[in-house]
Amino acid sequence: MHAALSISVITHKTVLMQQIQNWARVGFHWFHSGVVSADAAVSWARKADRYYAVSLDRNQRARAKALGEGRAIMLMHEIEGSGELWWILMVTPPNRTHPAHRLEPLKNAFDGASRIQLTGYELCHVTKRGSSAPVLTWRMTAAAYEARREEILDTVRRGGPREHRRLIVSLWRSPGFFGIRQQVGHCVALLRSEFRRRRPSQTLLRLPDKLYYLSRLKVVSVPLTVWLAAQAARVPHALPHDNHDGSSSGVREGNSIKMRGR
């Protein structure tokens, strides 16, 4: 089997977020991301491995590092049963030569103007109270955070007990990274104060005692070939294939056109 087909598809979004955080923390913080359809996934995985060696194991990456070479990894995840794979190519800095810096429009995840974003969350540095050094964490984007606040105000104003319960559950199910927990705490404070202001004669539903704290999660994933087989079974005749001209027409917002035909 081609080495690229051993690339795994991470099954849980929170695990994906933690893996992105971990890889960025150890130096793989230049990135490019996009979406690939099921029928183009094999072609894209082969190209990524051919040009960027994303399927190297830990020992091979260590040898490359010792030789002063750049390294790259690729993570994949199906967003909310879409039948497509969101992928991210993560590469070491350009001071260690790697072809991805020449062939892909890589961005620096530690630059505030080009953070990694995923479904309304962004990877960023946040300084904890009482600490002088910032930590790498996930938080809601400014737009997503403002949308959450508006949702709270509207739900308290218009909703009944069922809507209030649904809102509380959704807040407590937010991924438990420090930056997100901090924002959820502010949202809960807003919920309490707005409820007292709007409904002084009513009692707010009981809130959980603590916000969910994220510990190190086990990486649960399936090989790309297994994910593709599941897609083929779910969508009749949607079999993965490589285009005869070697292109990856199903890759969006990602694979550099420069790679096609190389």
Image (cartoon, rainbow, N blue to C red):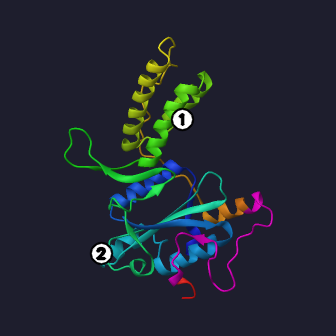
Disc 2 on helix, strand or loop? helix
Disc 1 on helix, strand or loop? helix
Check the image and report above or below for 224 versus 101: above
Q: Is residue 175 visible?
A: no
Check the image and report above or below for 90 versus 246: above
Residue 241 covered by magenta stretch: yes
Q: Which of the image's four quarters has the C terminus? A: bottom right
Question: From mark 1 to mark 2, how far is it between C-alphas?
Answer: 46 Å
Q: Amino acid at mark 1?
A: Ser
Q: Is residue 58 visible?
A: yes
Name which quarter of the figure residue 213 lies in.
top left
Say which residue label 2 marks.
66
The image shows residue 204 at horizontal and vertical percentages of: 50, 18
Residue contact at pointers 1 and 2, CB within 8 angstroms: no
The image shows residue 152 at horizontal and vertical percentages of: 50, 32
The part of the chain drawn in magenta is: 232-258
| Residue 170 circle label | 1
